[in-house]
Amino acid sequence: MLVYRATKCPTFSSSRDGEDDGHDGTLIFSMSAAYSASIYLFNLFADKDAESYRKRLVVARACASLGIEACKTNPNLLHSAIFLPWCAAYEVLAWEMIRLNSVGEKDAAAAVRVEIETLMDLLKLFSRHFDTFKKQWPVQNLRRFNIHTADLAKWNKR
């Protein structure tokens, strides 16, 4: 998919070659789903294998970056299940922030916190288009990190 994206679809633009939003939306969802699957596979070995841990972090950041790009282009390109990969990326970044804080790398942890905030901004934007996702388990499960507890609790009450 990355080669296809690089050669055929370097930007998400429905005006490209007269294509409709379905192409871009499908590509965004497919790439996000692949990122999510990779995150979960690397997660199987991340505790015991430094390379799996590193790759999981790289994939989580790529997933977040794709979400940012898609939302900046047109939030209507998002599939209603796209929040699942975003939740997986959020979890990886939250664990990385916790790890960095535990070893005293406060500046690096703060940089990861910015990435987490960006993901929460994506989830907030997404919530304006698909309101019901806010109460679902993958989103509400993010409360265990105590980063966006108030936002998530508020969403659960609506």
Image: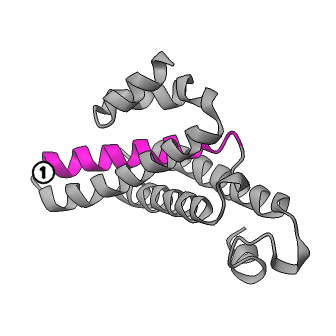
- For this rendering, which residue is in front, 22 or 47? 22
Measured as percent of width and height from the top left, residue 75 is found at: 64, 54
Q: Quadrant of the N terminus?
A: bottom right
Q: Which residues are magenta?
A: 80-103
Question: In the displayed image of the protein, which residue is found farthest to the right?
Answer: 18
Measured as percent of width and height from the top left, residue 46 is found at: 40, 48
Residue at image point 13% right, 56% down: 106
The answer to whether residue 45 shows anywhere in this view is: no
Residue at image point 50% right, 50% down: 122
- For this rendering, which residue is in front, 66 or 154? 154
Q: Quadrant of residue 136?
A: top right
Answer few, some or many: residues within 10 Å of disc 1's Cα (few below 14, many 20 plus, some between 14 and 19). few
Q: Is residue 88 magenta?
A: yes
Disc 1 residue type (three-letter): Val
Q: How is the image coloured?
A: one colour
Question: In the displayed image of the protein, which residue is found farthest to the top?
Answer: 157
Quick check: 48 above or below 69? above
Helix, strand or loop for disc 1:
loop
Q: Quadrant of residue 54?
A: bottom left
Residue at image point 45% right, 60% down: 61
The prevailing secondary structure element of the residues shown in magenta is helix
Quick check: 45 above or below 22? above
Q: Is residue 113 left or right of residue 5?
A: left
Q: Which residue is mark 1?
A: 103
Measured as percent of width and height from the top left, residue 44 is found at: 48, 42
Measured as percent of width and height from the top left, residue 55 is found at: 45, 60
Question: In the displayed image of the protein, which residue is found farthest to the left?
Answer: 104
Q: Quadrant of residue 111?
A: bottom left
